[in-house]
Image (cartoon, helix red, strand yellow):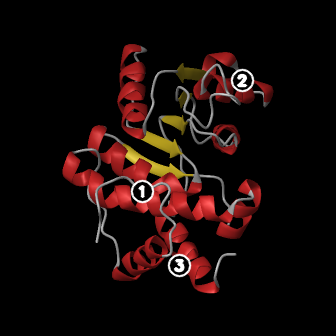
Amino acid sequence: MISEQAWADAELIWDFHQMHHEPRPCSVAVGLGSHDLGVADTTVDLYQRGMAPLIVFTGATSPTTRSRMPHGEAVHYRERALELGVPPEDVLVEPNARNTGENIRLTRALLKDAGRPVESVLLISKPYEERRAYATARQLWPEVEVISASTPMTFAEYVATIDDPKLVIDMLVGALQRLQLYPDQGFMVPMPVSEAVLTAYRHLRDEGFTSRLIADPVE
């Protein structure tokens, strides 16, 4: 049972993780692989709305996707895009990335090798990964403008799709911890975090929403 306070804290962090960018036409739409096929659907929707002339899906497999997407996240995303009517020549696949940093680095290299100039990137991720993806791209692809996007939904709507509130809150807490740790490791640019969000993070951490935390403590 999730307490009323924990739910409120999680909603605050959920909102913080989103960049609230307004999608606009960019050089390319990059869909970051994950267990969530909604990322592919949203990428296709943005493509079909004229927000990008080209799609890149990036991602290998992970323990959570290996059984559902045995050919790799990016490959399955591409298959979904073709089902939704995207021409094959407008979808590139980067099948090797195993984390967000590799998503960015390998996609950048793929587009360079393909001779596709990039001035701006429409970066599509899970809703609670928007800020982390943005900060990573700004660090590793600094010469392009980055617009973050995800499937529009509330925290409650997302929890309903996963049907595991504790797991979702664990993921929110883990993503926020990484936003605090990874800039010092050179993985992403620093992103200011308000005291209200940090307080919510500490509340949830202390209540045991810790399965997605990594070893380094963050106070």
State which quarter of the image contains the N terminus. Answer: bottom right
Q: Nearer the viewer, mark 1 or mark 2?
A: 1
- Residue 213, disc: 1
Residue displayed at 75% across by 56% down: 161
Asked whether disc 3 touches disc 2, contact meaning CB atoms under 8 Å apart, the reply is no
Q: Mark 2 falls on what kind of element?
A: helix
Judged left or right of residue 202, residue 158 is: right
Which of the two labelled residues, at mark 3 and mark 2, occupies the earlier sequence position? 3
What residue is pinned by disc 3?
9
Judged left or right of residue 116, residue 86 is: right
Q: Does residue 181 appear anywhere in the picture?
A: yes
Residue displayed at 59% across by 42% down: 51
Residue 175 spot, x, y in % from top left? 44, 57
Q: Observer-nearest residue: 57 or 59?
A: 59
Judged left or right of residue 57, residue 134 is: left
What residue is pinned by disc 2?
79
